[in-house]
Image (cartoon, rainbow, N blue to C red):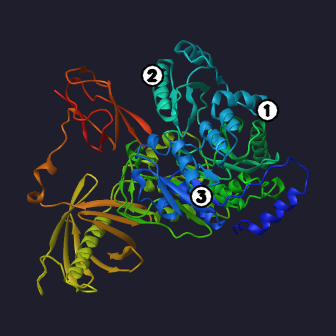
Amino acid sequence: MLHKLQTAATCSRRFASACSSAGPKVAHRQISKLLIANRGEIACRVMRTANRLGIRTVAVFSDADEKSLHVKQANEAYNIGPAASQQSYLRGDKILEVAKKAGCQAIHPGYGFLSENVEFAELCQQEGVTFIGPPASAIRDMGIKSTSKHIMSAAGVPIINGYHGEDQSDEKLMQEAQKIGFPLMIKAVRGGGGKGMRIAETEADFMPMLQSARTESEKAFGDSAMLLERYVRSPRHVEVQVFADHYGNAVYLYERDCSVQRRHQKIIEEAPAPGLSEELRKQLGEAAVRAAKAVNYVGAGTVEFILDKEDLSFHFMEMNTRLQVEHPITEMITGTDLVEWQIKVAAGERLPMLQQDIVKRGHAFEARIYAEDPAGGFLPGAGPLDYLSTPDPSSTTRVETGVRQGDEVSIHYDPMIAKLVVWGENRASSLQLLIEQLTNYQIAGLQTNINFLIDLARHQHFQAADVHTGFIEQHMDTLFPKKVIPSEKVVQMALAHTLNERVQSGARLGKKTAAPFDGEYGFRPNYGVARPLKIKVGDVEHTVEIMTNAECNYSVRVDAGEWMKVTVRRKPYMNRFLLETNIEGHVSCFNAVIAGENIALFDENGMVGGEIVQPRFLVTESAMGGVDASSVTAPMPGVLDKLFVKPGDSVKVGTPVAVLIAMKMEHVLKAAKDGVVKAIPNAEGSNVRKGAILMSFE
């Protein structure tokens, strides 16, 4: 059974006991008002703990976030600028000005944005505002990857072979790359979150990959310096949660496995890492503590290791000097609140627990739910959350989110919608709960990765904990099979559409419940008339004929096939249009979400979407028009950052023509064929929608 968080009284007793022992004197500072210098789910997460501790919270928000959940949940909120993060959430001067104006004693940076910004941490110290994070010196030492490698090597922490020097000339980097050998990893020295990271498979790939990584790093971190490392094929990514206080105490709270990634970014994490012996687990933890002590670390940090999948040797990769996105799974297996620990340590208290007090129990998973297209290369998306229904929170299920139904996933920020966190007595039970709760996380209005996460969690190799950082690439065929939608789903869509019409018709007539035949087009008493519907699922269009026999009783056939006997009834359940169908003796239950002509069905396999095809005479000419094949279009909403060509230029197939920035990532767009640029409708810096024509050719 999941053990409870420590009570405030227990923490106070431990603190009083610890203070009686010898050690450096650190001034205790009361924190009664806290500014959260972040947005979305992490801002809401920090506020939840602050509220429990009786600390008032202050939010900051950009113009795009004025109506966001984190703004609503805070005691106060202040606008800090335009939507672009460089003009709002990255403006440390504005944020510090708000903190002083609001009377805050401390600032919690969350993760991302200013959380690992040395200058901001120093500025807070100068202005007498507590920065809830490590000392600026630790951020500096561990934030510059080349420096951190030297420090870790001196501290006896294993490091991987590579180049971490100051000479950043193309010639020097090429020489070092040739010494290391290919494939190799190119990484921004100030990088994180997969930004500024590229893999050069061959020597010919090196220079193009180097330039691309430099450009992305400059935009994300204001620094284009790179390091090179030997690329370990099929490694595991294992990280250790560490915590330290001002008194020289440092502990590890066990490890997390974050191996399954896409685009070098984590998608699903678990704690503890499966398949490790207790001896190896201890070695990892102690190495992480040595790393923290080597830089006089204070607060929450994560030491990341590359773990060789074959011999289980491990090497230091980097240290994240902040709270991690995946910190909830550590909390679930240790019964702790790491945000509470952060606040108490920042206030001058000792660690609430020492190493011998920290016990791991059970197993936890975190699945990151994104607005993205997995089958389309995991390209990020944006748009409104027209429908949102989540699992019920409990002692074994956490939903970490910063959005509500009706909110919009913005092009300006990360496309993560939520984190689903579950706990079980062991890995198998925890994984089963994860799958169940993923099916209960239902979103319509924009594309998400939920179906992919369900397929991933059910994959036989993931079930067997046979994971590594190339897992998705290795199993592309089985993770993205060509799916055939059974005719039963098409029937359910048709019935959901029909019943929804009845409900809507009843509502228009002012009735609490609709009569059996309200809105049943083509119905005449004592005369069976089959009503045809055209439904498109994916690229396939189906013709469904529905004949009403009696209330809740139908005859249905798909694409002129055999007639099927069907009964359907509605099962009221909160905000869900829950239906139960009996199709030729097969009884199943599903939730239907209908918006205009679009239909989404949710069941134990995730979501299946379709649309009612309008008669041709109802479709406008503009809607029927297609995009000119001789063009470059935006694969997602974003900002047109660079144009490499102008009208009249000749281009060859594969030539880079533009750069699109979306969800903080750089996407290089290339010409699909030889041609001459005819027109470029949008200027550099323009916001463009998905599918917008960025360039047309003669």
Query: How many labels were placed on the picture?
Result: 3
**For marks 3 and 1 on the same chain, the one whose residue lies earlier in the sequence:** 3
Query: Within the image, what quadrant is residue 186 found in?
Result: top right
Identity of the amino acid at label 3? Val
Q: Residues within 10 Å of mark 1 (few under 14, many from 20)?
A: some
Q: Residues within 10 Å of mark 3 (few under 14, many from 20)?
A: many
In the rendered image, the quadrant that contains the C terminus is: top left
**Quick check: marks 3 and 1 in contact, CB under 8 Å?**
no
* Residue 493 visible in image: yes
Of the two numbered discs 1 and 2 in the rendering, the one whose residue sits closer to the viewer: 1
| Residue sticking out furthest to the left | 617
Of the two numbered discs 3 and 1 in the rendering, the one whose residue sits closer to the viewer: 3
Mark sitting on residue 208: 2
Residue bearing the label numbered 1: 155
201 left or right of 289 in image:
left
**Quick check: marks 1 and 2 in contact, CB under 8 Å?**
no
In the rendered image, the quadrant that contains the N terminus is: bottom right
Percent across and percent down for residue 362 are 69, 61
Residue bearing the label numbered 3: 46
User: In the structure shown, which secondary structural element does the residue marked by tag 2 occupy?
Assistant: helix
User: In the structure shown, which secondary structural element does the residue marked by tag 3 occupy?
Assistant: helix
Q: Determine the CA span between mark 2 and mark 3.
A: 41 Å
In the rendered view, tell whether residue 542 sits above or below residue 63.
below
Percent across and percent down for residue 479 are 46, 48
